[in-house]
Amino acid sequence: MSTERTGRTGPADRPDWPATEGDGTGGAAAEGPATDPGAAPVEGPGSGVPGRRPGELTFRETLRWGWRQLTSMRTALVLLLLVALAAIPGSIVPQEDVDSFAVGQWQEDHPRLTPIYERLGLFSVYDSPWFAAIYLLLMISLVGCILPRLRVYARAVRAKPPRAPRNLTRLPDHTSYRTQESPADAAAAVAAVLRKRRYRVVEEPEPDAAGDVVVRAERGYLREAGNLVFHLSVLVVLAGFAMGSLLGYQGGVITLVGNGFANNVTQYDDLDSGSLWSPDDLEPFAYTIEDFDIDWYRSGPAFGQARAFSAQLSYTEDVTEGTPEKTYDLRVNHPLTIGDTDLFLIGHGYAPVITVRDAEGEVAYSGPTIFLPTDLTFASFGVVKVPDGLDTQVGLEGEFYPYYGFDMETGPYSVFGEASNPRMSLIMYTGDLGMDSGAPQSVYALQRDGLEPELDADGVPVRFDLAVGDVAELPDGLGTVEFEGLERWNRIQISQTPGKLVALGGVVAALVGLLGSLFIRPRRVWVRVRPAPVGGWGDVGGDEDDQDAEGGPTLVVVGVLDRSTGAGGGDEELQGILEDVRGPRVRAERSEETA
């Protein structure tokens, strides 16, 4: 027995390989143009049809060309890149549906850019028509790319091993040996070994034109199945995302510690729902934040920042009477699930209790006022709007400092996130708050179009610096403002995502399919069995060493192709097949060669 290796050869080097079923490696033979002189001319660009200019396309041909361009992998990659680029403004520019307060602040700081950004929809990128158009084209392109490939992979999974090349010695890994068995028995013995090694085997019932008994086998079909699963899972993931976008919703609510929330549309601070979602899909639950705990970093580079925090909830899954109350510690990345709804704790902050009275001491405004954090030390910004009760409409705008500190260069700041020395600074505005127009406006920012800052005798805006319990007089005898106390608030995100399990299943399937397509090694084995020549070998595919060897009247030629490497890589598989076929004889020969 001898083994010969040769380099990979192209189709021009093996003209004897069948052209109808590929070259044995899985590549399809090229089909040339029709040469039938009686065939009807094909209509198309440059086809010579009367009345058609070269390169001219009909409307149908134009649609077909456009569809092929859209569903090409190149176009899909370009659209994917465009989606990534289009998402950049959404991560840089504040978004209305995420933080309307930050949007208002940005617009105040960039008055010249604001009209341009609004016209381009950069404050709501993911709801803009241009982003939706790119995303929709990407989905169509992916589906158009994937569906044809699914058919190709499905056929590959069911396909039988291709016909054997006539000359197996041209394969990267091959060998031959002689045996005393008849050609039919020798072929059957090799086929039985291949089946034990989990190959899909096809035995030709009759000798081929060259008089050889042929066995063809292949394994590693799970590689094609992995490709099929991977591409199919992409569609599953897209379907899951579509379900979540159309049938789900996401909302946010700020709840004071000690207060509660009932799951009703009117209770949400912001609500973003799918086009097929209905308020009837809301789960009928309610919760109350009983307490709130927070742990601070008190040393190191993160000094003053929150280490961890949790809200102690009591909730009912149904607001009807008799429903038992349950408790839950809501923490970051530990959501509470009620039915199909998830509750996430995503933020917290302070709500100073502010009271505004008129000149006679009557309360015009009183209650905890949400201040939104502006940095990691929980220095916060907020506003107070007093539309009624005073002689004029009053707006108070300022900052709150949990642990007040002052620097001569930078001014007031917060040393620490914990409210050990709370203090706030407010600037007063008078005029028209714009609340009577009926137009919606943020509760966290003043619309200054109709407002003017109140100035003192030196022309400096009136500012009130208040600690807890301090009372300040408003100018012109309008009344007083008092900092009565301090409360805490939690921001809860509430969402329904119907397709999340579908998308998760698609992602898992994609990983499994990708692993299969990467690590499963498909191999093809061909066997040709023929009577050993008596008067000369000629072009029968035997090895030179076997021409002089003794062993029997039947020649067996085995070729292996490792499709994952293309050239080489099948020598170990070839030796394993020979050991199983020839048994002790091969092992004895190997022992002698080693010795």
Image: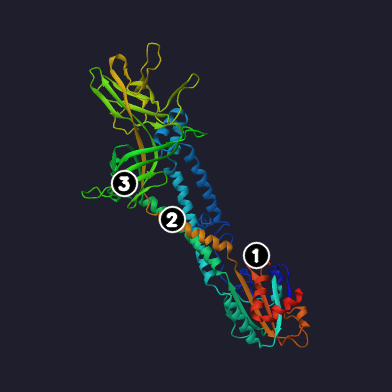
Secondary structure type for disc 1: loop
The vertical placement of 230 against 275, above or below, is below
Q: Residue at x 45, y 23 (%)?
A: 405
Q: Position of residue 227 (x, y in %)?
A: 53, 63
Q: Nearer the viewer, mark 1 or mark 3?
A: 3
| Residue at 42% in and 33% down | 102
Are there few (<14), some (14-19), or many (20+) residues within 10 Å of tag 3?
some
Quadrant housing residue 435: top left
Badge 1 or badge 2: first in the primary sequence: 2
Q: Earlier in the sequence, mark 2 or mark 3?
A: 3
Within 10 Å of disc 1 (Cα), the crowding (few <14, some 14-19, many 20+) is few
Q: Which residue is labeled 1 in the image?
A: 565
Label number found at residue 503: 2
Disc 2 versus disc 3: nearer the observer:
3
Q: Quick one: quadrant of the C terminus?
A: bottom right
Residue, disc 3: 327
Residue type highlighted by circle 3 = Thr
